[in-house]
Image: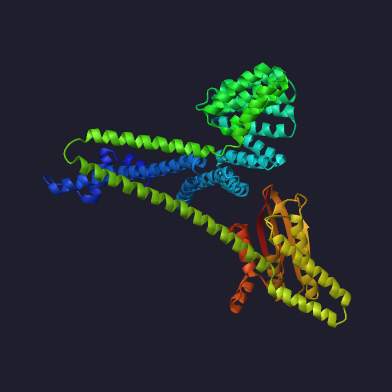
Amino acid sequence: MNTADNQIILAGCTLEGIKKMRISIFGAPKRNDLLHLIKTIFFLLLVFILPITINTVTAQKQHVNDSIFSVLDSLAKQQIDTDLDQALLTLEAHRKQAEKYNNLYQLALAYRNYSLYYLQQADYLNSSRYSLESIKLAKENGFTRLMGVNYNNLGVIAMRQGDFENGKEYLEKAIAIYEQQEYKIDALSHSYQTLAAISYSEGKLDKAQQQFELGYKYALRTNNIKTLASCSNGLAALHFRKEEYQKALKGYQKALSYVRQFENGDKETAGILNNIAIVYRNMEKYDKAIETLKESLVLAKKSDSKEDIKKTYSLLNKVYKAKGDLSNALIALEYFTAYSDSIVDQNTVNEIYRLHEQFQASERKAEIEQLTNENDNLEKHAALRFTLFVVSSLLLIATLLFVYFYNRQSKLKIKVKQQELEQKVLRAQMNPHFIFNSLNSIQRLYIEGKEDLANDYMADFSHLLRGILNNSGKNAISLEEEIQITELYLQLEQMRTDNQFVFTIHLSPDVNPKKLIPPLIIQPYVENAIWHGILPNKKKKGNIRIEIEQPDSSIFTCRITDNGIGYSTSIQQKENKKNTSKGMAITAQRLGGEKAVVIESKEEGGTTICLTIPIIR
């Protein structure tokens, strides 16, 4: 019973209405009829209390589900920055919960977090795939607020790979979405900052300045100190590159005023101070530069950043040299060398310090417990507490080790499975029947005295084998190379079957054949069309048409159409022969599963196979 039904019931429940309903169910009341009174009370409870209870329980259940999703989302984003192994477990829980309740919004949200997870690991392929999956769900269901961050992720990925053109395209899409969402001001400022970094890398300094200024403007609206500092630093770098040293100095000082507001921002402050010192050096204000670098050195040492300490000593060495103070230049160089050659890793120092703090904390805890429990049976209670502590610690350590080795084993299994899949692909591509039949055809041509034709066939056959062997060892090849291999295979099969079929390959004008895709994708489906569609149909000449389109910048669609016996008939014949196409099944796995392969039988006869092929960046 839903809320609308309850409202209709309650609307009709005037005193007169309740009276009539009661009479219709229980009959007219009798005086001093206790049983009838109990029935009336039960009826009122049924009318008023039960619907309210049902609605309350339903609302509480929905609230609990929303709370679980909110916790999983927040926890995943936090763990992506701190604990990647644990983050993966949280992401899996979020995805499974969303699938369990068929919550498409939360599923799109989980995909977005997967993209952030892989972006943190610099696994750009998987990060792109999950962002595209999230965008697809968002478009289909109108989740506009999720599309901006996914486009921003794709822009960052493209920028890191040096693909500035696509990076700008994605970031501009993200900005267009953010500008329509009042609550996305911080995201908007970050996208402008990233876009400015691309323009700066391309040497488009005026455009970069405009974008940094927009990022700064939006960051001001939410007082986002980190973005304000980054944009100020970027603008200062622009002025420095233009040799506008006064403006650069002013910009770096503004950035410095922001980073000084960071919590635990000693490292960032030291970096800005180093930039300021470089400006002073170029202005030949060596004393100012040395003074600034000494301040930076104090903060770098305070933050225990060995890399920043090394960088600062290197700058000191250069400034002292420029000033002509070779003695101090040598001292700075010696310190730089000492930090470079240090065998004590910074992480080791931090770990020792952390263990030392833990040890001191445990000692203080033991002292407090001893002072608090100076009564009877002190030794017995202390021993019991110690035993419990040891057992708990061992259980915790065992659990952590189990999780660690389980995750490690899972990753190894995935890697082994991928290697096995690649080997299966090669074996499926190198179809033994095709090789055997091709060699027989070559032999037949030689016996018939058609040596020129046999030599041509042999040359094409060797080119095909070499192409398949070369491409099977690669993670990606261009669409152009894939089409060349497929066309060569079709020509050989056409020659071997005495021209029992014709074929055409058509590329739409919007297709860029230089884009990269997974290797050896189209050939298994073409082979299936020939052997299980065209050749069994003796009534008419076969026709195979391959059409390739590019609906957007992330995928190609490849449509393979034949006029053979049809998919359902072909499947039935395969089952009778107990024969299955492993090449097609393996290729479907490589494309992402059955959703990426759509097979349809045509009413007039024949089959159409549509492949969704991801573009690898």
Q: Residue furthest bottom?
A: 447
Residue at left offset 69%, top offset 47%: 553
Is residue 218 visible to the viewer in this orientation of the structure?
no
Res. 476 image quadrant? bottom right
Is residue 97 visible to the viewer in this orientation of the structure?
yes
Residue at left offset 43%, top offset 53%: 402
295 or 39, nearer to the observer: 295
Res. 360 image quadrant? top left
Q: Position of residue 255 (x, y in %)?
A: 61, 23
> In this picture, is 476 found above or below 496?
above
Compared across the picture, whether 372 is left or right of 135 comes to: left
458 or 342, nearer to the observer: 342
> In this picture, is 444 found above or below 19?
below
What is the count of numbered marks?
A: 0
403 or 310, nearer to the observer: 310
Q: Position of residue 540 (x, y in %)?
A: 76, 74
Compared across the picture, whether 195 is left or right of 21 comes to: right
Q: Residue furthest front?
A: 327
Res. 577 image quadrant? bottom right
Q: Residue furthest left?
A: 32
Which of the colour schemes (rainbow, by chain, secondary structure, one colour) is used? Answer: rainbow
Compared across the picture, whether 43 is left or right of 605 comes to: left
Q: Position of residue 415 (x, y in %)?
A: 57, 57
> In this picture, is 474 found above or below 153?
below
Q: Position of residue 494 (x, y in %)?
A: 79, 71
Residue at left offset 75%, top offset 32%: 203
217 or 561, nearer to the observer: 217
